[in-house]
Image: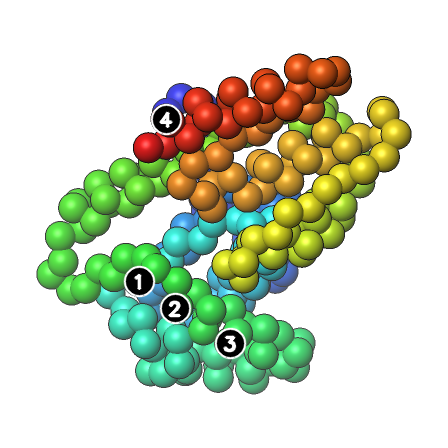
Amino acid sequence: MDDWMTFIDNDLTRGEDITEELLEVIEGSRISIVVFSAKYAYSKWCLDELVKIFQCKESKQQIVYPIFYKVDPSEIRYQKGQVRDGIAHLSKYEDNLTKVGSWKAALTQAATLSGWHISDGGHEANVIDEIVKVISTKIMKCTLLDVATHPVGIESRVEDILKLLNVEQGDPHMVGIWGIGGIGKTTLAKAVYNSISHKFEHSCFLHCLIGSKKFFFILHVSLKVTNKAM
């Protein structure tokens, strides 16, 4: 666990708008844990963070876990009660009007995800233990490949490949990356692998080989991986 890097936005200086520093932290995260409370929707900062997190879930395959702390998930999903009141309060300010739609969409989407509900009188320590176990298992499965020291411009290419792979729709496709040597095919493949490997129960990256032994090597490794998975 010494290699884990965690971040909480309490360490940042609060301002009117979400900062570039926080945007970079969200974009660089593998997992986001969103803690919803009854007063959550009164914070423009929190709602802006939530929108950004779900943008990264879509574009970077980021894992998102919601925790509903003493608030019913249905209030988040359908914006009822204090959640409705919080959005109504923020809607009084003209600068927020264009954001209300994206805030509501992100809240609805968050409440449909599998997470944890801590009710009044609930055993918080037990829930925390379970969260740690789930996150630990997820991270242990995600051994990231070394892509490049400065992978400039690769993110948009990764997003293009992810759309072609169609993993999010539950009907993954096979995609081939072709081109002359040295243009970054393997680098791109590694970056794509890092983005989606956590979505599968088992994963393996087989580096391409040159020569007549290529097929036999891949067959040998594939059989070993299959045997291990079983």
Q: Which residue is mark 3?
A: 104
Front one among 160 and 72? 160
Q: Which residue is mark 1?
A: 68
Quarter of the image where the N terminus is located: top left
Residue 37 coordinates in the image, percent (x, y):
33, 65
Snapshot quadrant of residue 200? top left
**Badge 4 local density, few (<14 within 10 Å), some, or many (20+)?**
few
Circles 4 and 2, Cβ within 8 Å, touching? The answer is no
Say the numbered circle drawn on residue 111: 2
Distance between mark 1 and mark 2 Cα atoms: 9 Å
Disc number lying in front (4 or 2): 4
Tell me the amino acid under the disc marked 1: Phe
Tell me the amino acid under the disc marked 4: Lys
Mark 3 or mark 4: whose residue is earlier in sequence: 3
Mark 3 or mark 1: whose residue is earlier in sequence: 1
Q: Residue at x 40, y 81 (%)?
A: 78
Mark 4 or mark 1: whose residue is earlier in sequence: 1
Q: Which residue is mark 4?
A: 228
Q: Secondary structure at mark 1?
A: strand
Q: Residue at x 48, y 84 (%)?
A: 88
**In the picture shown, does residue 196 fall above or below 203?**
below
